Amino acid sequence: MSAPAAGGRQAGPAGRQVGRRPVARAGLSDQVFRGGLRVSGGAVLLVMLAVGSFLAYQAAHALRVGGFAFLTTQGWEPDAGRGHFGIAAVLTGTVLIGLLAVSLALPMALCAALYISEYAPRRLRQTLIALVDLMAAVPSVVYGLWGFFFLEQRMTGLARWISTYFGWIPLFKVDGADPHDPLAPVAAYTSSTFIAGTVVAFMITPIMCSVMREVFGQAPQGEREGAYALGSTRWGMIRSVVLPYGRGGIIGGTMLGLGRALGETITVYMIISMVFAIQPHVLQSGTSTVSALIALHYGDSSPFGVSALMAAGLALFLMTLAVNFAASAVVARSRSGAAS
């Protein structure tokens, strides 16, 4: 081994002096900032671990009694003494409402974000941003009241029309209703997954739109101008620059909205009619969710019933974690700007 050369240099393989890589010492402010980030990140993980541990501890009794049947049983009678309770029905309703809400909210949020960031006049842009942020701040109970008293009665006609012409699709079939009879009661179309999912879609659209708009606004100006210089139209520039750059934001905003939709409580509870059976027909009256189940039975449950509700909450907690981890993996593979 050759000795280090004077001045902090070291001889290379051919005798050439190779300089050391300069290392910048972090100042006090940088060290404080780095320490704050580590503490914040650790606190988030500790809170998540504490919530999961609390739910698991409280749900242990019910899970021991229910066993694997807790995932496959549709009824909910934990206090009947027979151990007949499970989350098969409420979990199915939760997923259906969440997926329906995201399916309706995604095109609205994407179009609104593109209009605000690319098409809206500069004077109007700040007003639209403020309005979208204001919609995100509206309490859930307001959306629930609006959905129950205003939207529900006006959507039964649309539900009947969809069932009439698309009832051959199992998802849009309504049992016990004749869509061709104009005098048939509309009660079969109220308090359905379709209405609840529509209201939840209006709730999560502002959140998804805000995330997408922020990412679209960070698309490189140089690449925008390069697309125009090559003769591209505005839509061509958006398709070749903005959308590929904002792919991670679209996915992240969508998954954030899905997480909000899966855990929505008061709005869904005010609209749906609870049924403890797997109900795959989204236009038909009656459905159930985990959050609505907890809101309905928490006040009058026995200690064992509370343990069963904690088990349902644990299942919802794990499901939302799985959705977020899956979204993080997808976003990591499609970093914003990687394809633009």
Image (cartoon, helix red, strand yellow):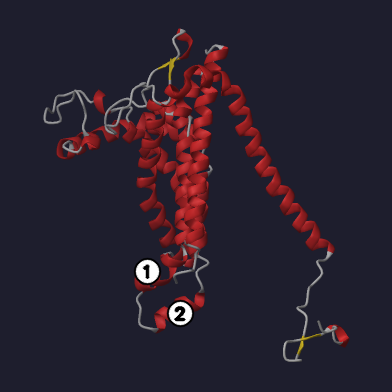
Q: Quadrant of residue 54?
A: top right
Tell me if I can see residue 142 in this picture. yes
Question: On the picture, is 76 further left or further right than 46?
Answer: left
Image height check: is 257 above or below 144?
Answer: below
- Residue 288 at x, y = what percent? 39, 26
182 or 159, which is in the foreground?
Answer: 159
Point out the residue furthest to the bottom here: 15
The quarter of the image holding the C terminus is bottom left
Report the residue at 18% width, 40% height from top.
166
Q: Identity of the amino acid at label 1?
A: Arg
| SS under mark 1 | helix
Q: Crowdedness of circle 1 by 10 Å Cα count: few (<14), some, many (20+)? A: some
- Residue 301 at x, y = what percent? 52, 13
- Residue 266 at x, y = what percent? 48, 29
Image height check: is 33 above or below 2?
Answer: above
Tell me if I can see residue 213 in this picture. no
Q: Marks 2 and 1, how far apart in space?
A: 14 Å
Q: Which residue is mark 2?
A: 225
Image height check: is 295 above or below 327?
Answer: above
| SS under mark 2 | helix
Q: Quadrant of residue 180?
A: top left
- The numbered disc on residue 239 is 1
